[in-house]
Amino acid sequence: MPINILMPALSPTMEKGNLAKWLKKEGDKVKAGDILAEIETDKATMEYEAIDEGVIAKILVPEGTADIAVNQPIAVLATEGEDVKAASAGAPAAKPSASSSPPPAAKPASVPTPPPPPAQAMPVAASQVAPAPTSNGHGRIFASPLARRLAKAAGIDVVRIAGTGPHGRIVARDVEAAKSGGATARAPAPQMPAPQAPAVTPVQAPADDKIRALFEPGSYEVVPHDNMRKIIAQRLVLAKQTIPHFYLTISCTLDKLLSAREDINVTAPNGPDGKPAWKLSVNDFVIKALALALIKVPEANVTWTETGMLKHKHADIGVAVAIPGGLITPVIRKAETKSLIAISAAMKDYAARARARKLKPEEYQGGSSAISNLGMYAVEEFAAVINPPHATILAVGAGEQRAVVRDSKLAVATQMKVTLSADHRAVDGALGAQLMGAFKTYIESPTAMLV
């Protein structure tokens, strides 16, 4: 029976995507692990990997098509022994993309919940959670080709691994968990239900035509929103309507940090290209300091859900990176365990791939807190909007020389203002103050971050 290849949901916020490029053509044979196409989401360009074997009978959506709805058929795969022409003849008609359809009626902003990815194919880096692995009734365990390769290399039988991927599929992270001694039984461990966004009644915005009527015709041009800008708008509205923000601001003295940074950078050997092997930034110290502060004040290293508080064992720090058309927040995992040099290298890699839209979903999803740094733009102080599911975000301003009082005398010090935005459901004022105090201690005594 022919298999419809559907537009996948490559991220939790994805409703539509662009089919950037087909890497297979009609009549090509496909085996598990082959890359079928490149899909552009609101955040990145990802490869779409086949799970089943067969022949591409018909391509329903040509490359370059934009705004294809999740779960819309994009091609038909004829399985082994099937007549390719018959499978092609029975293919569903291609639906027009949203970009060629009349605009939908306005609706309240919310974070979309995409349907689960299709069973016949999945992205290389899937991150959705599902039940234990299932079989096709003939003893076959569903696992991604990457997971099978990793399991084989590690000498682990996939039958013994609990799958957490779409429809219970075994994915790469399950193999890594098994290698590190995690649960390998077929039945998954009980999981806390995913947090549900409370129902909200957003303030109704004026219709577009009413807003445009306020301006003289011809005095502006309309630039349609791309998927990234739409998702950013939806998430920010959700955050401000459902998360009770409060803010705490402190000033940190940077003189010792700047001196330590200079000393460390001077010791950097030259790499193969003749340039220093590393060059630490103030932001690298900020990432490390926040991570250590969260570990020191574990009650603030949390995520709010309606059924219970998620207390994180590690500090996974998201760092906002500006890219054309918006921003993305790659996550430094277990930042408290990484050296400043490792953090610096990771951020340079993430920033470069973020601007090229080459980040994988697991590289920018999740995290326990985040940092937004506008100091390089000479912004002295600001408050950031919390990015769910985080309970906190730290807004970092510019380091500037300021007059301070020391021992009843005026002196000059380099200071930086930082503002913590906190979810009051998860972090109380006193707890937020403890977190900020710990952060200030690490920033002002940077050698504590090196031991």
Image (tube, grey):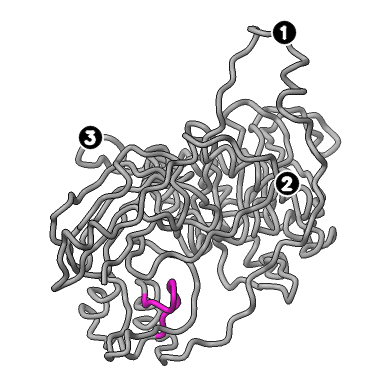
Q: Nearer the viewer, residue 391 or 62?
A: 62
Q: Position of residue 67 (x, y in %)?
A: 46, 42
Disc 1 crowd rating (10 Å Cα; few below 14, some 14-19, many 20+) is few
Residue occupied by mark 3: 274
> Residue type at mark 2?
Pro
The reply to whether the magenta stretch includes residue 111 is: no
> Residue type at mark 1?
Glu
Task: Judge depth for marks 1 and 3 and give the one in front.
Answer: 1
Mark with earlier residue (1, 3): 1
Badge 2 element: loop
Q: Nearer the viewer, residue 271 or 410?
A: 271
Residue occupied by mark 1: 216
Q: Position of residue 41 (x, y in %)?
A: 44, 46
Residue 450 left/right relative to 433: left
From where the camera sits, is residue 279 visible? no
Q: Is residue 306 above or below residue 229?
A: below
Residue occupied by mark 2: 108
Q: Is residue 431 above or below residue 103?
A: below
> Residue type at mark 3?
Gly
Quadrant showing the N terminus: bottom left
Region in magenta: 162-170
Determine the residue positioned at 86% across, 36% down: 408
The reply to whether the magenta stretch includes residue 165 is: yes
